[in-house]
Amino acid sequence: MAYVVRWLVLVGVVLVGLAPTSAVAATAVTVTVRTTPQLAGVRFVFDGQAAVTGADGTARFTGAHDFAGHTLAVDERELALNGRQFMFARWAGQRDPDQAFRRTVQGLPLRRDYTVTAAFTARFRVTVRCVDQDGRAVPRGRVPYVTVRSDTGHTRRLPVGQPVWLDGLLPVYRKSVLTSRTVGYALLSADAYGTNTVDAGRQRFKPASDQEVVFRTPFHDLTVSARDAVFGSGAGRAARVTLPDGSVREVPFGTGRAATLRDLPHGQYEVEVTGGEGLRAVQQVRLSRTQSVRVRVVSRADLALAAGTVGVLAAGLLLIGRRMRGRRGGERG
């Protein structure tokens, strides 16, 4: 009997000793805030208590179990890290769907442990450059802007050679899970002299991995020469070329009676030979590669020859006509 009494007393002491610890454990509730993408240094405030995310992108707040509503806020300032900007986009796990896009959410419970996710849009500093088909830098004055479209459907006009900020990571909420996805862009146009130098959609990049973007914008040379239409000799003094934007370039013929216009984008051109002693010679050229064009010019010599040929032909016809009339007269006699 004495043994049983001592055992009950011992059990009672052990239970009394454990009771305070169990009670504390039962009333301590932790709210974990995580970021997507995973970011260190983001400041959150829970009921006036501030915490900053660590290297794992999380911050934790612990409080006593209760049935009151609590407040969680994200710092209003933008976060800049290593050439990137992060801006708060939305929450997940905040319980009230109407507060998903507010920087401060209210009415959060402290009844059990749970996690709230804060998603950020990431913007990256991107610089665009253009090179020709041989890898040579294209002067900014020739292609000052390019137009790109993101896979979210947004179109942007970007200055060449100047840094700009582009969305590179966007939050995605699917099946109650908030994550981030990478944004891609496609080059739509790189205009020079009124024509697009590229095929839309062929060249792509992602700001999250490509901060120095190089687009290939091909340019071609056009060599113009002129020859007499009949005699084949050199004709004219210069090539006058109208570009797709309506501007005009005139280049004098050099040795070999030829003129070369360099660094032209593909497109439709009007080529004219000037300074010739004959009719105006104009030819339409569709430039898609480096090429040579020979314009046939009708010179004064050609016109004179043509006039002489017509005169001889007319005289011959007249003579034949006379002979035929003479024969008919003899037959009647």
Image (cartoon, helix red, strand yellow):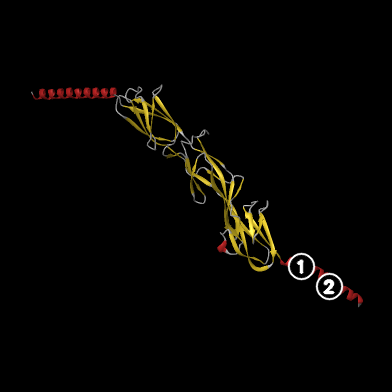
Q: Nearer the viewer, residue 251 or 318?
A: 251
Q: Distance between the residues labelled 1 and 2?
A: 15 Å
Q: Residue furthest bottom?
A: 1
Q: Mark 1 points at which residue?
A: 22
Label 2 Cα neighbours within 10 Å, binned few <14 / some 14-19 / many ≥20: few
Q: Which residue lies furthest to the right in this view?
A: 2
Left or right? Give the position of 98 relative to 112. Answer: left
x%, y% of residue 144?
47, 39
Q: Which of 101 and 290 is in front in this view?
A: 101
Q: What is the three-letter code of the residue carrying label 2? A: Gly
x%, y% of residue 237?
35, 24
Image quadrant occupied by the N terminus:
bottom right
Q: Which of 69 and 208 is in front in this view?
A: 69
Sequence-wise first label, 1 or 2: 2
- For the point 63% across and 60% down, the residue is 116
Label 1 Cα neighbours within 10 Å, binned few <14 / some 14-19 / many ≥20: few
Are the residues flagged by discs 1 and 2 in contact, CB closer than 8 Å? no
Left or right? Give the position of 1 relative to 84. Answer: right
Q: Mark 2 points at which residue?
A: 12
Q: What is the three-letter code of the residue carrying label 1? A: Ser
Residue 214, image quadrant:
top right
x%, y% of residue 138?
49, 35
Q: Is residue 113 above or below residue 161?
A: below
x%, y% of residue 179?
60, 55
Element at badge 1? helix
